[in-house]
Image: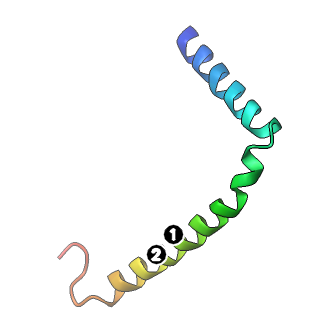
Amino acid sequence: MLQLAVGLLVIALIAALLGFGGIAGSFVGVAKIVFVVFLILAVLSFLGGGLSRRGYWR
């Protein structure tokens, strides 16, 4: 249990350093582009699966 608490403390400290240091703000543009790309890929995957002749489990 103590190992879990220490691990979460380390993760929180790293997140605080990245967030308060301004480093995270520079990645906002990249995150938006990656989100749009994966959203388009997910929609294409759903449409392709629904338009196939055979179902997923057949």
At which x and y percent is residue 54? Answer: 21, 85
At which x and y percent is residue 22? Answer: 80, 43
Give the quarter of the figure containing the N terminus: top right
Residue 58's place in the image compared with 16, above or below, is below
Residue 6's place in the image compared with 24, above or below, is above
At 71% from the left and 25% from the top, the residue drawn is 13
Q: Residues within 10 Å of mark 2 (few under 14, many from 20)?
A: few
Residue 34's place in the image compared with 14, above or below, is below
Real-space Cα separation, disc 1 to disc 2, in angstroms? 5 Å
Dot 2 amino acid type: Leu
Using the image, tell me which numbered label, if any, was put on residue 38.
Answer: 1
Find residue 9 and report its image quarter: top right
Give the quarter of the figure containing the C terminus: bottom left
Q: Is residue 38 left or right of residue 52?
A: right
Q: Residue furthest top?
A: 2
Find residue 49 and report its image quarter: bottom left
Q: Which SS class for mark 1?
A: helix
Q: Which SS class for mark 2?
A: helix
Nearest the viewer among 39 and 31 is 31
Q: Residue furthest left?
A: 58
Do the CB atoms of the residues marked 1 and 2 lie less than 8 Å apart?
Answer: yes
Res. 1 in view:
no
At 70% from the left and 34% from the top, the residue drawn is 15
At 57% from the left and 9% from the top, the residue drawn is 2
Q: Which residue is mark 2?
A: 41
Dot 1 amino acid type: Phe
Res. 21 in view:
yes
